[in-house]
Amino acid sequence: MASESQLARLGLFDARVPRYTSYPTAPHFNQTVDADIFRGWVRSIPENSRISLYMHVPFCRRLCWFCACRTQGTNSDDPVVAYAEVLRAELAVLARDLPRGVTLSRLHWGGGTPTMMPPEVMAEVAGAVFDIVPLGENAEFSVEIDPNEIDDGRLDALAAAGRNRASIGVQDFDPAIQEAIGRDQSFEVTKLAIDKLRARGIASLNADILFGLPFQNNERIAASVQKLLSLGPDRVALYGYAHVPWMARRQVMIPSDALPRPEERLRLFETARDLFVADGYEEIGIDHFALPTDGLAVAAREGRLRRNFQGYTDDTAPVLVGLGASSISRFPQGYAQNAPSTSAYTRAVRDGRYATVKGHAFQGEDVLRARMIEALMCDFRIDAAEMKRDFGATDAQLRAMFDRARAEFGEMVTVTAAGFAIPAEARPLTRMIARAFDAYDLSKAGHSPAV
């Protein structure tokens, strides 16, 4: 890896850049994409094709202070049950426009805490989905699991519905760090949940862990990673904590003076990465790790790795439909987002309308640049032949983009007749290098630390 002084000279420890789970990024969405445009995009889906579906459940029993997701706390199941009814109503609206024969490649329930739904409600929601768009061959149905908010009844309901993948948020097992981020989740509770998932035939389990948390140091993150490894997840997301209290007000509860410095964040990442690799996990993109047999690792080796709002994926479906408040859909034509507030979303759906309030219709070089950025984030290289063959790029167009990035990053990138690449030693700079291919106003898009 490049030295810290080289990385510092290029601005790694000061930059705030997008995570590039989309291009353009969500801050550039606007109200020109509305419910009518969304309907047209749904109707344009080819018959008998495969799509993916994401369902957002924005409720938690408790609000973790580190989280910047759109969620709300509730001690009662009533709002969750009422919200599930709206989800079924939204599915009914979608059914009016969805072409015949469409099946699911991926179904993901996220949040929030989707496991707050009672077992019978889970069964009803899953049934409503599959009545409209059934699971296709080799499809994945994944659910985000809160170990503190799961029991045998809900696990059985999910298993009966066909869930074959689960995702568990760990963040960190250290009690002092958990107290500082408002997350009480013991190793024992997490292990019990995983054991019960495995007993119900989960084909693949992924876990999230964070670096850059308050009071975290190399010893503490190493201890948490080793505990996580003992649970045998098939894939792991090692995300950097983004401290953005001006956007996520609950983060004001986190002591900012206890946060590691940017240089320390990089060392925390390296400590965790080395442990995952030593245990046989393959590095996937900038922040994921997977066992060699996991679908994500296979996709990375075969050049099929993709990136969406859930992070890295082996899903190549061209359409992702988002259900629920704040959910984002992706089509070949662009992005569409539902109303972020639960009340506005609910009003629209109960009126028999789509809840789309903003988005972005692709124009100009958007599709080309989106693929270039995705290729860098997934494979650390841009294949010039692919860009010319699939996106109509010209040699002059590519040369101008590549030269602009090389002028900024020098020896940290390579440009050849075959394309553009980020050498292994420069990979901490990947998001910054990807930003060089972003044609939009960068002051609106980046709020996450570059490392």
Image: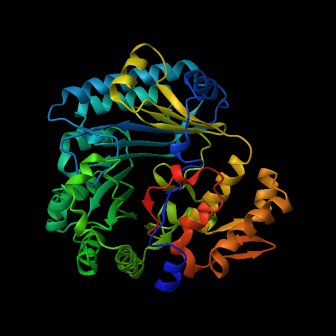
**Relative side of 395 to 411, left or right:** right
Q: Is residue 256 above or below residue 327?
A: below
Q: What residue sits 68% from the left and 47% below the top?
A: 366
Q: Which residue is nearer to you in this view: 2 or 319? A: 2
Q: What residue sits 26% from the left and 53% below the top?
A: 251
Can you see residue 17?
A: yes
Q: Is residue 368 above or below residue 273?
A: above
Q: What residue sits 18% from the left and 30% below the top?
A: 77
**Relative side of 140 to 369, left or right:** left
Q: Is residue 359 above or below residue 172?
A: above
Q: Quadrant of residue 111?
A: top left
| Residue, far top | 351
Question: In the picture, which quadrant includes the C terminus?
Answer: bottom left
Q: What residue sits 32% from the left and 64% below the top?
A: 209
Q: Which residue is nearer to you in this view: 113 or 195? A: 113
Q: Can you give x and y, in whole percent of width and height, for residue 250 in the image? A: 24, 48
Q: Can you give x and y, in whole percent of width and height, for residue 307 in the image? A: 54, 54
Q: Which residue is nearer to you in this view: 135 or 238? A: 238
Q: Quadrant of residue 126?
A: top left
Q: Can you give x and y, in whole percent of width and height, for residue 272 in the image? A: 35, 76
Q: Which residue is nearer to you in this view: 338 or 46? A: 338
Can you see residue 421?
A: no
**Relative side of 140 to 51, left or right:** left
Number of marks present in the image shown: 0
Q: Quadrant of residue 254?
A: bottom left
Q: How is the model colour-coded?
A: rainbow
Q: Can you give x and y, in whole percent of width and height, for residue 381 in the image? A: 66, 69
